[in-house]
Image: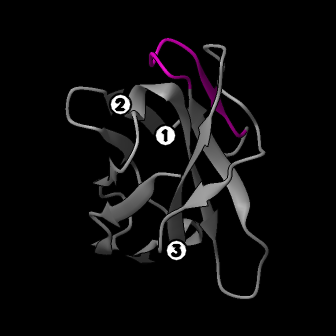
Amino acid sequence: QLLLVESGGGLVQSGGSLRLSCAASGRTFSSYAMGWFRQAPGKEREFVATISRSGYNTLYADSTKSRFTISRDNAKNTVYLQINSLKPEDTAVYYCAAEEVLLDIAPLGGFGSWGQGTQVTVSS
């Protein structure tokens, strides 16, 4: 399993932007599909976006595809989530996840490694 550490969260005003980072260590990063999920207060954790091993393939939730961009830098063992035009409903703990895969796919689920999360709070 990978060790995942998220950063970049914080308090931001509505309409602002953030870039979340997730640094991975412990195994070969480029063997893993990566994902971002979020959990708002009182709600279940939900899928945000995933990216394939190479970064070529991505998958987004319908609610995030217009404002969120997932990317990765395999040389830096890091995956990113750029969030633009933030809304109060984006307030949540954002989690990074990883799953070792054979194919260059962006999976919807089945992630076995998870980070501790980073809090994003959007004020109106």
User: At x 46% / y 52%, what residue is drawn?
Assistant: 2
Question: As drawn, is 89 to the left or to the right of 110?
Answer: left
> How busy is the neighbourhood of tag 1: few (under 14 within 10 Å), some, or many (20 plus)?
few
Q: Is residue 57 magenta?
A: yes
Of residue 69 and residue 111, the one placed in the foreground of this image is 111
- Looking at the rendered structure, the secondary structure element under dot 2 is strand
Residue carrying label 1: 67
Q: Is residue 73 visible?
A: yes
* Residue 62 spot, x, y in % from top left: 73, 38
**Comes first in the chain, label 2 or label 3:** 2
**Cβ–Cβ under 8 Å for marks 2 and 1:** no
Q: How is the image coloured?
A: one colour
* Residue 83 spot, x, y in % from top left: 40, 48
- Looking at the rendered structure, the secondary structure element under dot 1 is loop
* Residue 17 spot, x, y in % from top left: 30, 53
Q: Is residue 83 visible?
A: no
Q: CA distance from mark 1 to mark 3?
A: 17 Å
**Comes first in the chain, label 1 or label 3:** 1
Instruction: Indicate the quadrant where residue 20 lies.
Output: bottom left
Q: Which amino acid, mark 1?
A: Arg
Judge depth for marks 2 and 3 and give the one in front.
Answer: 2
Magenta region, residue range: 52-61
Q: Quadrant of the C terminus?
A: bottom left
Residue carrying label 3: 93
**Cβ–Cβ under 8 Å for marks 2 and 3:** no
Residue carrying label 2: 72
Q: Which amino acid, mark 3?
A: Val
